[in-house]
Amino acid sequence: MKNRFLIILSLFVIAVGCKNVATINEKEAGEKITDYLKANPEYKTARFSFGEMKFNSEKDMKELEKYRQLADEGYVSLSLQSAKKKFLSKDSSYVFQIRLTDKASELVLKQDDDRATVKVVQYELASEKPVDFNRINDNNAKVTVSLKKINTPFAPFQKNASENSNFITKTYRLKFDKEEGWKVLK
């Protein structure tokens, strides 16, 4: 009698212990994506030149205005090295020394001698709820979310500054791991 009871009890424990825990719903998937984006934020980058720079033409003067805007916000420091005013000419020549400040360090990803890779757009989750949730099979799911664009002060330096949308949609893949549970694949 005892043996029969122990066998039934052990079978019950095994059946409950081996239950498939690979279930996920839209809310849990949204939470996983939110946690992932907090740890690995999405952003767009551009190359940014600094150091000693010469500005001559009207096109260069438009570029100089971008640097002056950054200087006003405290991300770079501008110091005039030399200025040559051409007599009766619209084109003058200015040489500036441009330096990144400590305030810019949070937006600089990689820095060389006279160029840096900077964040020009950062993306944040538009809402906690996913746009689309699709469970492929027991261990895989696809989640599409809407990310809103937030321009950084370096946004004027991106190549395609005139974009047609204030948000992007991005699809993430979730995979079930027996040890870690559901996780986002890169």
Image (tube, helix red, strand yellow):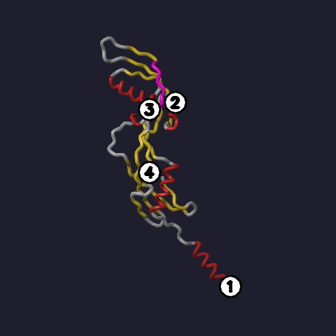
Say if 52 sits above or below 35 in the image: above
Pinpoint residue 159: horizontal percent, then vertical percent.
37, 36
Q: Residue at x 51, y 53 (%)?
A: 35
Question: Which-is-in-front pick, marks 2 and 3?
Answer: 2
Q: Quadrant of the N terminus?
A: bottom right
Q: CA distance from mark 4 to mark 2?
A: 29 Å
In this figure, which residue is indicated by the disc labeled 1? 3
Q: CA distance from mark 4 to mark 3?
A: 27 Å
Kindly state the secondary structure of the residue where label 3 is placed. strand
Pinpoint residue 40: horizontal percent, then vertical percent.
50, 48
Q: Residue at x 41, y 54 (%)?
A: 145
Type of the residue with mark 4: Leu
Question: Which-is-in-front pick, marks 1 and 2?
Answer: 2
Earlier along the polypeptide chain: callout 4 or callout 2?
2
Pinpoint residue 29: horizontal percent, then vertical percent.
47, 60
Please report contact status of discs 2 and 3: CB closer than 8 Å, yes or no: no
Please report contact status of discs 3 and 1: CB closer than 8 Å, yes or no: no
Type of the residue with mark 1: Asn
In this figure, which residue is indicated by the disc labeled 2? 101
Res 48 label = 3
Q: Residue at x 46, y 58 (%)?
A: 30
Type of the residue with mark 2: Thr
Q: Which segment is the magenta one? A: 73-80
Type of the residue with mark 3: Phe
In this figure, which residue is indicated by the disc labeled 4? 125
Earlier along the polypeptide chain: callout 3 or callout 1?
1
Earlier along the polypeptide chain: callout 2 or callout 3?
3
- Name the image quarter holding residue 143: bottom left
